[in-house]
Image (cartoon, helix red, strand yellow):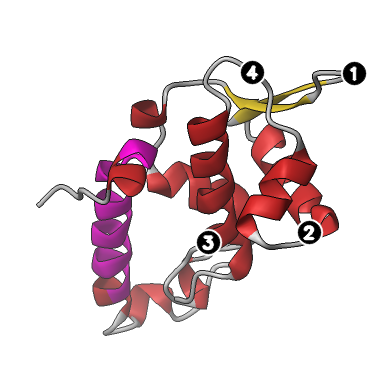
Amino acid sequence: MKISTKGRYALRILADIAEHGVEKNVPIREIAERQGFSDKYLEGIVSRLSSAGLVKSGRGKYGGYRLVKLPAEYNVYEILYAAEDSIALVSCLEDDVEPCPMFNDCLTAPLWQYLQDEFRHVMERVSLQDVMDHKFPT
């Protein structure tokens, strides 16, 4: 599995909002300037995060985005799941695909499922606050 720029940027966006938007909305333009990517690309990612209920938007003079929870209450898995098209290690474990006809007879399927489950558990233990603090559970 390879985490795309959407997933990596989603983490950076939420960390930026957490850092700069404690008591205010953070405009997309400011996030884009600090993070070094285009407003347009950022809007697409923030739209996914908003649809997943991870951020809320405000309009008008003080418009922008803010977190709906504290950074410690977000986990990396939910962020990547919202941003990525898929976070499956192998295609036969993707959510929205036809089940592989060989899955039940495949010698390696249990391994892929085990690795996928372990990877998810690790991502669920790491919070957005951990990412911001560079401190990860062992």
Query: What secondary structure characterizes most of the magenta part?
Result: helix
Relative to 123, is 87 above or below?
below
Helix, strand or loop status at disc 4: loop
Nearest to the eye among marks 4 and 3: give it. 4
Q: Which amino acid is tagged 3?
A: Arg
User: Could you say which quadrant of the image residue 114 lies in?
Assistant: bottom left
User: Which residue is rendered at x = 52% and y = 21% of the image?
Assistant: 22
Residues shaded magenta = 112-129
Residue designated by label 4: 24
Q: Which of the two labelled residues, at mark 4 and mark 3, occupies the earlier sequence position? A: 3
Task: Determine which residue is flagged by label 1.
Answer: 60
Front disc: 1 or 2: 1
Furthest residue toward right: 60
Q: Amino acid at mark 2?
A: Tyr
Mark 4 or mark 1: name the one nearer the start of the chain: 4
Instruction: Determine whether, in the image, residue 123 is placed left or right of residue 32.
Output: left
Q: Amino acid at mark 1?
A: Gly
Res. 8 mark: 3
**Residue receiving disc 2:** 41
Amino acid under disc 4: Lys
